[in-house]
Amino acid sequence: METKVTFRNTQAKTSILLALSEAKCALSHAQLNEKLQGICDRVTIYRVLDRLISEKKVHRIADIDGSIKYASCHQCNHPKTELHTHVHFSCQKCKMLICLDQIEPKVVLPDGFEIKETNFTISGFCNQCNV
């Protein structure tokens, strides 16, 4: 018998998802904490982010400096059952990290290998800083 997993919506979950969906770029945990203005503590933010990632509503991005940022999957073109494979762009000047949904690199692995997670980040200057 198949067990159906249900996810409950809490104020913290709703607020975090709203903050990420309204953001123009990916946000760090600290940026999310600041935007939430005390709605929940930092540990709750991490737990909710992990839940949203497992629900494929949010994805985690490793920036070029090693920091982790989070973005809403509202613009992602991937079906919710597939891997998150588009490219991210990290601006070296303004530190903005954005999804480039239209660019999806093709990865071919040797036999016997299986992809569980991908992270493609390009570094340079965004269109605002490259003037």
Image (cartoon, helix red, strand yellow):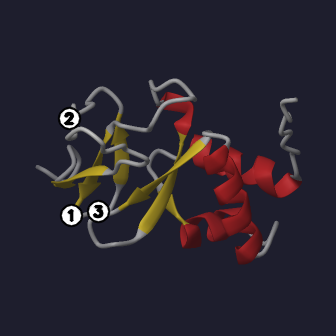
Q: Amino acid at mark 2?
A: Val
Q: Residue at x 43, y 38 (%)?
A: 84
Q: Secondary structure at mark 3?
A: loop
Q: Earlier in the sequence, mark 2 or mark 1?
A: 1
| Left/right of residue 101 with respect to residue 45 in the rendered view | left
Q: Can you tell which mark lies on residue 94?
A: 3
- Residue position marked by numbered label 2 in the rendering: 108
Q: Earlier in the sequence, mark 2 or mark 3?
A: 3
Q: Quadrant of residue 94?
A: bottom left
Q: Are marks 1 and 3 in contact (CB under 8 Å)?
A: no
Q: Amino acid at mark 1?
A: Gln
Alpha carbons under labels 1 and 3: distance apart:
6 Å
Q: Residue at x 40, y 71 (%)?
A: 67
| Left/right of residue 57 with respect to residue 121 in the rendered view | right
- Residue position marked by numbered label 1 in the rendering: 92
Which of these two is toward me, 77 or 16? 77
